[in-house]
Every structure is written in structure tokens, then in C-alpha cells.
Amino acid sequence: MLRLVWKRLLQLIPTMLIVVSITFVITRVIPGDPVSVLAGPEADPQVIAELQASLGLDKSIPEQFVMYVSDICRGDFGTSLNYNEPVFSLILDRIPKTLLITFTGLIIALVGGIVLGTVSALRQNSIIDHLCTFFALLGASMPVFWIAIMSIFVFSVQLGLLPVMGMGSLDQGIGDVASHMLLPCLCLALAPMATFTRTTRSSMLDTINNDYIRALRARGVKERRIIWKHAFKNALPPIISILGVQLGISFSGAIMTENIFSWPGMGTLISTAINTRDYALVQGAILTLAVVNVVISLLMDILYMLIQPKVKI
Amino acid sequence: MNTTNTAASERAISSEALFKREEKANSLWRKFCRNRAAVVGLIIVAFMVFIAVFSPLVAQQSPNELDLPNRLLPPLSPGHLFGTDEFGRDLFARIIYGSRTSIIIAAGASVVGCLLGLVVGLVAGYAGGAVDSVLMRIVDGMFAFPSILLSIVLVTVLGNGALNVILALGISSLPKFARVVRGQVTILKNEEYCNAERVLGASHLRLVIRHILPNAMSPIIVYFTLNIASAILSEAGLSFLGLGIIAPTPSWGNILRAGNSFLGTAPHVAFLPGAFILLAVLGFNLTGDGIRDALDPKMKR
Amino acid sequence: MDKHLVEVKNLRTYFYTASGISKAVDGVSFTVDEGETLGIVGESGCGKSVMSASIMRLLASKAGKIVDGTVHFNGADVRALNENQLREFRGKDVAMIFQDPMTTLDPVFKIGDQMVEAIQAHENITKEEARRISAEALGKVGIPDPEKRLNSYPFELSGGMCQRVAIAMVLCGKPKLIIADEPTTALDVTMQAQILKLMKQLQTESHTAIMLITHNLGVVWEMCDRVMVMYAGRVVEQAAVKELYSNPMHPYTWGLMDSMPALNDTPKEPMSTIEGMPPDLRLVGKGCNFRDRCKYAQPQCAEVVPEPVDLGNGHCVACLLQTREHRLEREGGKRHG
């Protein structure tokens, strides 16, 4: 068991190295040379050379890479041109807000998907099953930014029920933040919920046709207990195994939805950075998101190993 | 007792008839057609491809003709089935021509992604060992980036425009294809018939092209179809963020982007392109699922 | 009139599939008395398991339905039980032992937890009490160190051990009838004998009736009082074990007995088999289901469904050629019993 975890942790090193290399390559090929941006369009060559030296751009590419990696390891992601602040502190401020909505959305999706998928599997081929399957199809095909806009239109513009912009403030009570979170989280939950519904349904169907489920029925155990205790625990592994992938999808969704709801997270940070050509911020942000994604996927993998007693030795 | 009687009427069929019936029921096309959802999906796909190919015939008006006095007309206005946008352009024409952009980009991106993925996956899976490890770690690294983020970054690097968007989305879908292809190849290359070919002295290239590739094809076709669906979503997302296809070229994403600013006065400008995106994505998803189920019901994930 | 523990009349269970209706159980009638062991024999796919599942109302697939017939247990109509009554009926009145012990225990829960659950489903007692009963039952079925075993997962036990656990679980409910669906098929030979011996011993202690489903005639001889031979969803012959072995009457039973290897067979001589395959259950209906493989078949066998006829001493045979007035002469064949 521990050996498996270690093996998985070791695999992380090359993956991280690749991630860092990709962002490094991106910073070198991205249009808009940082020096000419800093120095302005008509700077004299002397100034440009000095700036290049100060940024380490006069060194060879491998040297630059080593510098880049060591900077990152020290938490030095450079300085944002637009905010005039260290990129790292900007990200530290934003990332919890993105994690807040992605995780809330993912939990809503997980719970909702499991319930819908199970109900669907138990009443296979009934109207409820068809409705759930239809919902799952629709949810998986729904453009998240469109449903976000439409929910703003319905709940805020038409009904005036919910706030749309920003994340509210904790000073006005937790309810304020919660009401700001509601729509973004629901929009984010939709696509993963659809996938969880499908996965739960098929996994549950596989499980409930097993002999031990029949044996439990033959022993007169209550049906509800058979489903939610026995079938559920056996059907869980495939659901957990897709959690990591769904997390990545949720991050993608968050980048889109944050922009629509003006949620002050990584998504808005990245698009502002792109629009203002603030490349230090762009690469810092994508690197952070990738690392967070990898680390959380790893934790999910370990969780997956833990819930399977057959691996427990 | 009623059921017993219907049962009795069933007994007339002979075993040959039964065998024929089963054989017929098992052909791929039959299986696909028996799946009602898949048929609906295929019809949607056919419809989308039709309006994309024949846009000038379907839409009578030009998608770029300005008519400022008639801006933001509601749907069903005379001469404008879907109304007009913020510059008075006919929304119906823009959406129809937008389907062209979206479908071409999505299909193109899937072709690029599929070809790149095939190369990486085949090499990794067939070579195995160190080559496999290195290539797959790179793929893992690409997987670390949330897909839309990878596309955003690539478009930023490559610049706007249809070709660059195709390239960006294609590269972002490379890891998905590479993993599927590699998985298939690793299984197939150890099959008996491959070993037999090897013993007979077949070259690596021949083995891959003649024997491994055709057998790995079914999941690739499924992923290709499903990838078109996700590429439509990604393209629309990029254009919505103002990164992919830039107006005036119509794309479902950038029409939606424009509509977002007039939500209070003209919600249809945002609603309609989104509905088309949903429909197209649904169509490709249903078709892909249908092909998968017809090929192998056990392949469900 | 003496009351039977189980009384099944004209039971029909059909499966509705895309390519036709499969008549898995097609008009089966029989009884089981208290403390009696009834053997049910037949080749794979003849409807034995579907029949036992029908009695328990445990049809696995939704396509399978009981379309006709009655099942009475202790006088109560099993088909009319509501969900709660059914739950009481299962496990407390009738318990089941399945074919593959490795798959009948939930792989992700400890054995003790599953046993406690089975006990608490019927008795309102504390967990500690239920655990004590479980450990006792495990000891009774010959599992060493029962207290410790309660904390094992099923995959940590061998197949034979798992089957013992399953039997122990059945014992805790003190059922009046045990349906054992090929309880030894998945086990190796030495383990088979042990499990059968265990079942027999427990039966004499508690006076439980057993319905033993098997395709092994030897097991029937060892274990059963009466035996019922099934073929393609129908009962073809039913008799006391000794009667059946000394005087089998249905051509299918003859075939079954001939294809059973015996120690006094000439070595290396090919084993006798029944030619052909059982019919497709979607195509049966008219006539005798065995006619295509029966070397005695007459034209009328294709027309009339043979009804079981009592030829004396409760020996029932469903064959048009075997009647009170006329007996069929058996060609060749070995002698058993």
C-alpha cells in the first residue's frame, strides 16, 4: 500500500518537470517580448541590453531554464506589470477563491450525480431513468458560459433574486457570500454532475446484478440498506476514479464562469492578464493551476487506493 | 394466462429464422439504428453539417450587412427570423454562417489532434520502454493543464484566426488521443496474430499499418466523434473570451459574447447561438455514444 | 390430509428478451415436506436455478417474470407477499446457499459485519449479541478461530471456507427450508464431500428441509430422499431416490444415468453421452422438449405436451410412451443403485 503511494509520488516528479518545461517554453515563444514592453517602443539599445541582463535573458537557454526553475522553487514568479505586485502574492490571494467554487461545485455534482445515477439504475428503463439519462446528456453538452449567462438572465435580470457580480463580502455575513456563490457553483456543477450520473448509473447497474446483492436479498436484508450500504460501496471505485478528471474539467469551467460572474478568482486573473499582456502573471497563474490540478489528482488517486480493500495488504 | 397465450404464438418460428433474426440484429448499422438516441444524434449532426455546407442557401441575407436603425430587433421580426444583433445584422444569417466556422474548426481540430495523437500513441505503445515512458510523461504533463487553459495559452502564443484555433485545439486534444491509441497498441501488439506476423518477418511499419492500426480503429473513431463535440465547446469558449474567432467573422462563441452585453434588452442574441452550440454538441455526443455502444456494449465507461 | 411445507403448482417463469420469449420454467409442480431433502437434477440451463429464484421471488433480471402458477409455503401464498412479508420470508423461513461462495459474500465488508447484518435483519438484538451468535455458528460449521475470522474480508478466505461462512449465515436464521443451488460445484472434490456432510449433519440436528439443486447424480444419491429430474424447463421424472435409481423410466433420465461414469466401467471405453443439445428455450412449446434427442421418439411426441403421470409409489413420469398400460423397453444402458 505505502509502496504504491510512493510510486505514485515519484511519478509526480517527471510530470512536474514537464509542466514547468511547458510553461518555460510558453514564456519564450509568447508574442510581445517582455523587454520591449518594459522599456517602451523607442528605448535605446543600451537600456534594452541592461534590462535583458537584469532579467537574465542574455544567458543561454539551459541557464535560463535553471534560473526559471530555481525562481519558481523559491516562490518567485516575477512581478506583475499590471498590478505592480509579486505574481505569487496575487495568486495566493486568488487561488482560494477559485478552489472555493470549484470544490463546492464538485461536491454538489458528486452528491447530485450519485443520487440521480442510483435512482436511475434502480428504476432501469423507467421514466425517471430516461429523464436522468436525458439530463446527463444535456448536462454534458451544455456550454457552461451559456448556462451561466442564461441563469443570470433568469435569476438576476428577470427575477432579481440573486446577485451576479463579485463574491460579496464576509463582513455582510456568510449569507452574502453564499448567495453570490450559488449561481456560479450550480453552473460549474452541471457538467460534472452529468458525468457522475452516467458513471454512477452504469457502475450501480453492474453492481446490483452481482450474486452478493441477490444473496443479501435472500437473507432478508432491507432493500434500502442493500442499495445504500452494499451496492453503493461496491459501486464507488469507478466514481472516485473519475474525480480527478472532473476536477480538471471544473477548473476549465471555473475559468469561463468566473469571467461571467466577475468572481475574483484565477479565471478572471488569467483573462485580465492576457488582455493586458501581463505575461509574467499569465505563466505564473497557469503554472499554479496545473500544479494544483496535479496535486489534487494525486490525492484523489491515493483516496481511490484507500477505498479498495483488495489493495490493502 | 394472457401472457401464456402470446407465448404460444411465438413457438411457430423455426431456429433458422431465429438465427437469421439474430444475425441481422447484430450488424453494426442495425445496432446503431436500434439505439433511438444515436439516430437522433446522427440526424442533428446531418442537419448541422448541412447548414454549414449550404449556409448561403439556408440564409438569404448576408451575415455582415449592417443596418443600424434596425438594431436588436426581437425574433420573428419581419425579414429577420431570429431578429438582429447590436449592429442590425441578421442574427439568423450570423448563426447559420457561424455553424460553418464552428463545425470546420471543431472537425479540423479533431483531425489535427487525432493525427498527432496517433503518431505519439503508436510510437509510445509500439516502442514501449524508455520511449514510452518519456512520451507518456509529456502527455501527463499536458494533461495537468485544464484543457481550456491549454487552448487559451496556445491561442495566445499562436494568435487569433481559424487556422491557429484549429492548431491550438488540436494540440490540446493530443493527450486524449495519445492515451487511447497507446492503450490499444499495447494490448494489440502482444496479440497472437501480431506475434505470428513478426515470426513471418513482417517489418515494424507493415505490422503497425496493416495489423495494429485497423484493430485499434474503433475506439479512435468513437473518441474522434466525441472530440468534435468538445472542440465545438472549446472553440465557442475561446471566442466567447475574445480569443478565438474575432468579429466580424461570425462564430457561435463571439455572437454569444456580443449578446452578453445586451442581456437586459435583447436576451435572444445570447440565447440563440448558445442553443445551437448545445444542439450541435448534443448531436455529436449522441452519435459518438451510439457508435461506441454499437461497436461494443462493454466498452461503456 | 397432511400439509406440505412447500407446494408449487404449475409454475411458469418466462424471460422476455429482444429475440423472443424464453420459457425457462414451463409448468413445474412439486412439493417438499418438513425435514425432507428434494434433489433437483438436470443439465445447465434447464431452469433449475430460475425455478429456485422464482420460489424466493429473487429473479435477477427484470425481464424474467412469473407468469403463472402458485407457490405456497406453510400454507401462505408466496406470490401474494408484500415487501415486508417477503423480507421476513427470505432468510427466516427460507434461506439460500449459492453456487459460487466467493461471489455471494460482499467483497468490501468484513464477514462478521455481514453475519451481524443478516441476523439483525430478523431479530431485534444488539450487535454484541449478534456477533456472539455469529461466532458460535462459525464454530459449528468447523471454522477454526471463529472470533478472529469475523474480522476477515471474504477474499482472505478460501472457497470452501466462504461456503462454510455462507452455511453458518443460513444457520443463524434457523430456516425451515434451505435452497442450495449447486452448493459444491465451485469447490474442489475433497471440499465438496465435507460441505455436503456438514449440510447433512446440520439438517438432522434442526430438521430443516433442503432443496438441493445439482447436476451431479452421485450427490443426489448421497443426500436426497426424493429426486426430480428437469429438462428444458419441465419436470420429466419425479420419484424417491431409491426408486429412481433402481427403476428410472424417462428416456432422458436413462441418458443421464448412462453418462455418469462408474468405477466398474471398462477403462478407456468412451463415456456414453446424450446426443445433441438441449433445445433453445425460446423455441419450445409444442410437444415433448426431449423428442429431438430421444431415440424412442414417435410422431405424436412432436404434437402433445406430455403430462406427468403417477405410475405408483409417487413415481411420476412425463413421457407419452411410458403409461400405466404400456411400458417402453430400455435398450442397452448400465445398471446403478
Image (cartoon, coloured by chain):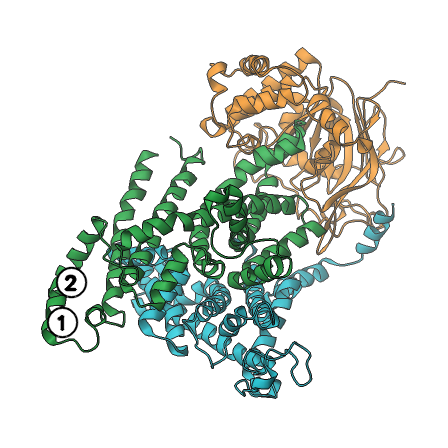
Chain colours: A green, B cyan, C orange
Check disc 1 and give the amino acid type: Ile
Q: Residue at x 41, y 78 (%)?
A: B162
> In the rendered structure, the residue with mark 2 lies on which chain?
A
> Is C240 on the left-hand or right-hand side of C110?
right
Q: Residue at x 47, y 69 (%)?
A: B240
Residue B260 visible in image: yes
Q: Quadrant of residue B290?
A: bottom right
Which quadrant of the rendered structure holds the C terminus of chain C? top right
Are both tags, 2 and 1, on one chain?
Answer: yes
Q: Which residue is mark 1?
A: A48
Q: Which residue is mark 2?
A: A55
- Nearer to the camera, C62 or C247: C62
Mark 2 Cα within 10 Å, few/some/many (few <14, many 20+)? some
Is residue B124 positioned above or below A232 on the image? Answer: below
Q: Earlier in the sequence, mark 2 or mark 1?
A: 1
Residue B264 in the image, given as x and y percentages of width and height: 59, 67
Residue C331 visible in image: no
Residue A169 in the image, given as x and y percentages of width and height: 46, 47
Which quadrant of the rendered structure holds the N terminus of chain C? top right
Q: Secondary structure at mark 1?
A: helix
Q: CA distance from mark 2 to mark 1?
A: 11 Å
Q: Quadrant of residue B142?
A: bottom left
Residue A105 in the image, given as x and y percentages of width and height: 50, 49
Residue B78 in the image, given as x and y percentages of width and height: 69, 84
**Which circle marks residue B37 in the picture?**
none
Check disc 2 and give the amino acid type: Leu
- Nearer to the camera, A291 or B256: B256
Question: Dots 2 and 1: beta carbons under 8 Å?
Answer: no
Q: Residue at x 64, y 52 (%)?
A: A132
